[in-house]
Amino acid sequence: MSDRVYIFDTTLRDGEQVPGCQLNTVEKIEVAKALEQLGVDVIEAGFPVSSPGDFNSVVEISKAVTWPTICALTRAVEKDIDVAAEALKYAKRGRIHTGIGTSDYHIRYKFGSNRDEILERAVRAVKYAKKYVEDVEFYAEDAGRTDNEYLAKVVEAVIKAGATVVNIPDTTGYCLPAEYGAKIKYLCDHVAGIENAIISTHCHNDLGMATANTMSGLLNGARQCEVTINGIGERAGNTALEEVAMILRSHRDIDLSTNINTTRIYPVSRMVSSLMNMPVQPNKAIVGKNAFAHSSGIHQDGVLKNTSTYEIIDPKDVGIDNNSIVLTARSGHAALKYRLEVLGVSLSDEKLDKVYEEFLKLADRKKEIHDDDILMLAGADRAHNHHIKVDWLQATSGIGMKPVASIGLDIAGEKFEAAATGNGPVDAAINALRQIVRRQITINEFTIQGVSKGSDDCCKVHMQVENEGKLYYGFGANTDIVSASIEAYVDCINKFAD
Ligand code: KIV
Ligand code: ZN
């Protein structure tokens, strides 16, 4: 029988730290339920002491899911651990994930401390967490750059103190696969009592080696890996869940298996991308739009003769259903509900009514409604409590004319109108809006992306703006590119007062 690898999903903690990707509690519950259906073993639901929002999410996720262990992150600080334990009180299986930086960079520059003191703090934190829960995971932050001999000493001490899992993060994404694998093997060979804990990988992708490092860790004795959906995470992200799951499934020669129901991979990937407004790069392994699209004639010919010529994975195995039902304006409430459920989204009746209303409006403008459109609608109620709203917008552009736009805004019930020109219709509309909202705003990032296909497609706009030294993220979605851009801009400026 193959050895089991535990999948620890940190989409809602490490993944959610990406600027502009924050979810509210309701959205986090939706993702957590989808992760449960996917078959993950552990859900890291947040860092409770960091904010009341994170605390609340851990509480609500603990109530909402049954099978996965719910994990809460802490520093090696008693207050953090108290708060995490409180947040986990409804979890059927709760885990506290505590830890401290162990590399000399962290010890010297972050803590102004020394190795002995850090070891003592690590042990104290684990013992303290053990007062609350049996399942305590310890992370040695920046283990990737920690001296192996010292790391082994820390790991041995925390296992003796009761740690059930020891996490060896390559926090900066620096390690080479052979080096990371050797580190895990070193721990297996040199730590007395290592058989009493599970070794976990936690790899970052700064040099594009997160998945390779995770695999190397697993091949050298780790039995848990910490991953995120679509590999999202700070900077270049974390190891992608879908990549590890499909490597282990495809390589039968590796005698390791997971509990992942791979046919749920694609729906969860789309859901996370949609709720977090984080596009998936088209060439992303397993879940990118082009991952199974053969465009060269030779490949197409081969695949038509026999898919195994150029495909190592059947797209259906990861839940890509090319024959998925397309909804139209004639589709009823029940069809929408059914399709959302297939995609792993279950909504309250009230929310479903709202989504159906938006669905009908979109179906009026767009003949076919695809899964991505539906997911976008299901996650798009952020504009409802905006105090600045667009009443109307008109933009004209074309060849041989100066683009011009006029706009009507409702700001907390008061009406304003303005018009302006620009170098294109979006520029003109934003110039008009700036005449009303007179603030110093710089647009740092502006991405427009089609949701599905066709010239009647819906487009998504992601925007990052800067105001008084602070960054704000906004999102818009519309079949009209200018309207979507203005929605994203208005979404940003509505956050200024937050
Ligand atoms: O990358 C890292 O070191 C982490 C720890 C807090 C587990 O995310
Ligand atoms: Zn991390």
Image (tube, rainbow, N blue to C red):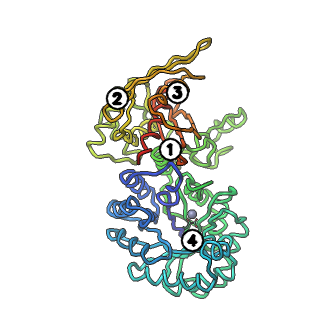
User: Mark 4: which secondary structure?
Assistant: strand
Please name the amino acid that badge 4 sits on.
Ser
- In what quadrant does ligand 2 lie? bottom right
Check disc 4 and report the residue beneath it: 200
Check disc 2 and report the residue beneath it: 360
Q: Is residue 184 above or below residue 418?
A: below
Is 293 in front, or is 456? Answer: 456
Label 2 to label 1: alpha-carbon separation: 28 Å
Specify the quadrant that holds the N terminus: bottom right
Task: Work out whether mark 3 precedes mark 4 in sequence or the reverse, and give the earlier one.
Answer: 4
Q: Residue at x 26, y 42 (%)?
A: 350
Residue 173: where, in percent of width, then height?
A: 66, 62
Left or right, 450 with respect to 79, comes to right
Farthest top residue in view: 400
Check disc 1 and report the residue beneath it: 473
Q: Residue at x 71, y 73 (%)?
A: 182
Label 4 to label 1: alpha-carbon separation: 33 Å
Residue 179: where, in percent of width, then height?
A: 72, 70
Task: Work out whether mark 1 precedes mark 3 in sequence or the reverse, and give the earlier one.
Answer: 3
Label 3 to label 4: alpha-carbon separation: 52 Å
